[in-house]
Amino acid sequence: MDIIIIGLLLGGTYALMAMGLQLQYGVARIMNLANGEMLVAGAFGTFWFYSATKFSPLISLAVIVPLAFAANWAIYRVLITPLVRRAKSQGQLEVDSILATFGLSFIFVGGLLALFGGDYLSYSYLARPIFILGQPYGLNRVTAFIGALALCAGLYIWLHKTRAGLALRAVAVSPSAAGLVSINVPRASALAFALGGAVTAAGGSLLSIFLTFDASLGVVFTLKALVIVIMGGVSDIRGAIVAAFILGLAETIVASLVDPGLTLAAAYVLFIVILLIKPEGLFGRRSS
Amino acid sequence: MSNADTHGDTKPTAFAQAMLDLRESAVLSGTEKRNLAICAIVAALWALLPLFSTGYILSLGISITIFAGLATSWTLFSGPTNYISLATAAFFGIGMYTVAGGVNLLPYPVLILIAAVAGALFAALIGLATLRISGVYFVIFSLGLAELVRQVVSWGQHVMGTSSGLYVLVDRSDSVFFWQLLVFTLVVFLVSWWIGRSRLGFALRIIGNDEVVAVHCGINTARAKVTLFIISSTFAAIAGALVAPRWSYVEPTLAFSPFLSFQVVIMSLLGGVHRLWGPLVGVIPFTIMWEFISAKFPSQTTLLLGVAFLLIVYFIPHGFVGLIEDFSRRRSGIWAALRSKWQAKGGGHE
């Protein structure tokens, strides 16, 4: 029972991070391999904020989210736009953006190493038990879960109830058709990329409440987010949320029954199962 | 080879004809013979290196030779198909660990063979799972692969109660070691060259241009991709097995370091991935430059490597080979213009 609850708590935070990647990949069509590094940057930012001010890590979101938004907007404008312009086809853009963001991820890791050093960083916040169904759980996990759910819900409503959200969803379906109904596609893509980065950093910030981070951990989170997005189906945000909970559960099961060092293996097993059974994702439609 | 020829003859479609034409144009021509001769001479000269120098220069030579082999085998698969593999370190580490784990039980040459088989089997599994479907699945899968294998190896060592670091003590002088690697790299080159002019290589280039077209041409795309991926990864595993004695101490974090995958990709891209000799043109300057950088800024290597990578992707997308070919094309263009001008002048005189 406690495995299920811990898995669900973890899944909530994963859902947030996967939504970030999904905005970047589904709408802006950029396969961002530096996504995990953005998450680690968010975690480190919160660590730094908390050690410096002793305010709640949740308040640090108010600083980190706008910063990450601005940083990702700049990344899209400066680094990705030239690639979009020079790409002759979608395939070419995919290869170029994979290479560029892969390089970017190393720059991030290098930058984080230079700023914070190579140690594991963690802090203690709300490390008290809270009782759910008579079992104790870390209050920090529950806090992060609630924070993540609130952000997920906010993002979901924004995407489905506002004009800007509608524009992003239109671009996700077809960039060229979206252009025909006078949606500014480059602008919408930049917005989606920046928003995705901000959401990912927020996910990192929340994860840092109960996880320990070091600078080289980004690639693991990139992979987890990618597995979630593929499992859920690239074009559907509900799929990502369901998939995030599945991954959270699978990881917790592996971590508590086999070995905590094998969580990545859980992600890979899910990945292989999805590839073999339903490569278009749980909620994806098979393209003809 | 002869089998492939008759195969082409039995299909008198326009496409098969085009394929046949291409193959005929690829039959060992004068230029190719000349190129092979140049290759042999360069390799022979390179093989003399240990006779003239030991120590630092030789170790630089060893690095260049390893990376030439690794980058060429990476390009063998990722160059024509555009499926970027970020998993070289996973296979390299598997090769290394096979040797490290068995060095006290089996003779070293047998271990190299086992490493090759292990690498091939692992690549086959991954290829069958990810390459049957087109798209980015393969790239994503390869991204965390080294980390996955590292976790599994660490876990295995933990369960079996062995220490995480292993010693590989095989008696080899630096020169012998160098020649071993040189032979390996030459084999990689010859195999790449041979595949590049075979039907398989041609099929891969079509897949890289347009996978749908390739399917409609009757190419079994999955089989072609998986085959090539296995060959390429087996080479990486063998490289790991060959390098293990040189490191003499092997540890999961060292053997599966993502740095290696990254270096291989960056060197290949720097050289250019559409020519056989492309990676080599990237490996030599990069290894020397990297030696310098990592000595000068040992704590900023990751950052600088990332910056170098972005510079290459943005400013020399086709690598040095692209630059060289652009330049020679422009030069021959000028030459042709001058000649026609001169001819026009000459015509005026008469």
Image (cartoon, helix red, strand yellow):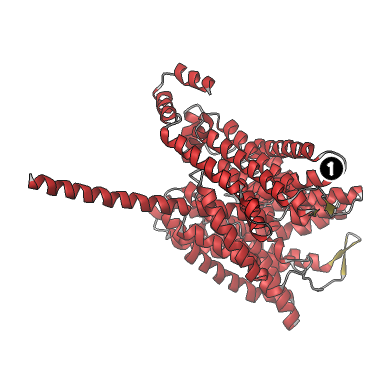
Q: Quadrant of the C terminus of chain B?
A: top left
Could you say which is closer to the camera, residue B199 or residue A72? B199
The percent coordinates of residue B287 (x first, y second) are 59, 58
Could you say which is closer to the camera, residue A33 or residue A7? A33
Q: Which amino acid is tagged 1?
A: Gly
- Residue shown at 85%/54% (left/top)? B164
Mark 1, secondary structure of its residue: helix
Q: Is residue A227 above or below residue B209?
A: below
Q: Is residue A232 above or below residue A68?
A: above
The percent coordinates of residue B344 (x first, y second) are 14, 47
Please, which chain is the residue tagged with disc 1 on?
B
Could you say which is closer to the camera, residue B154 or residue A192? B154
The percent coordinates of residue B138 (x first, y second) are 62, 44
In the displayed structure image, the side of residue B124 where residue B18 appears, left or right: left
In the displayed structure image, the side of residue B313 where residue B52 appears, left or right: right
Residue A60 visible in the shown view: yes
- Residue shown at 43%/24% (left/top)? B16
Mark 1 nearby-residue class (10 Å; few <14, some 14–19, many ≥20):
some
- According to the picture, the residue beneath numbered tag 1 turns out to be B102
Residue A198 visible in the shown view: no
Residue B300's quadrant in the figure?
A: bottom right
Q: Is residue B112 above or below residue B332?
A: above
The percent coordinates of residue A94 (x first, y second) are 52, 50
